[in-house]
Image (cartoon, helix red, strand yellow):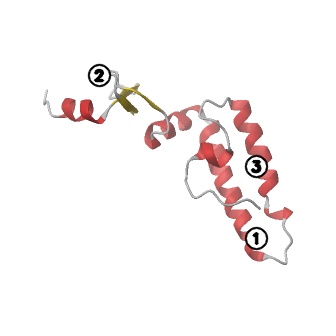
Amino acid sequence: MSEPVDSRNFYEVLGIPIEASDEAIRRSWRISVRRHHPDRYPMSDPLAVEAAGRRVSLINEAYATLSDPERRRYYDLVTGVRSAKCASCGSPGKLRLGKNGIAIAVCDGCLNWSNSWSL
C-alpha cells in the first residue's frame, strides 16, 4: 500500500492536475478506489484494512467535490489551489469570490487597500 497523503489537496489525492477534465477525474477515482479498497487486503492485518478504509473515504470525498462543477469551483476558491495574477496590479494573487458571485483574482495588498475604503 502506498503512503497516505497527509494534505487535503483533492487534486493530489486523486493524482490529477488542476486542469483535469471530468473524464480524467472519473477515471482516476475509479482506479484509486480499486487500488486502495479494503477488500484487497487480508483480514489478518486489521491496521491495513482500517488505513485502506480511511484512504478510500478520502478518495470518495475528493471525487464528490471535484466531480460537481459548483463544488469544484468553490473548493478552488476556498483552498486557493488555483493562483492567478491580480486584476488590479498584476502581481500574484488568489481567486476570490466577489459580492456578485463572480470569481476574480486579487492580491492581498489590493484586497487590504479596497477594504480600507468605506463606501
**Quadrant showing the C terminus:** top left
Secondary structure beneath disc 1? helix
Q: Is disc 1 surrounded by few (<14), some (14 to 19) or many (20+) residues within 10 Å? A: some
Residue linked to disc 2: 89
Quadrant in the picture for residue 63: top right
Q: Which numbered disc, 2 or 3, marks the residue that appears first in the sequence?
A: 3
Instruction: Name the kind of residue labelled 3 in the image.
Output: Ser
Instruction: Provide residue 38's location: percent of width, then percent of height.
Output: 79, 63
User: Which is closer to the viewer, label 2 or label 1?
Assistant: 2
Q: Is residue 112 above or below residue 40?
A: above
Residue displayed at 38% across by 30% down: 92
User: Which is closer to the viewer, label 2 or label 3?
Assistant: 2
How far separated are the C-alphas under marks 2 and 3?
41 Å
Q: Is residue 117 visible?
A: yes
Q: Which numbered disc, 3 or 1, marks the residue that appears first in the sequence?
A: 3
Residue linked to disc 1: 48
**Quadrant showing the N terminus:** bottom right
Residue displayed at 46% across by 43% down: 79
As drawn, is 74 to the left or to the right of 52? left
Secondary structure beneath disc 2? loop
Q: Which mark is residue 32?
A: 3
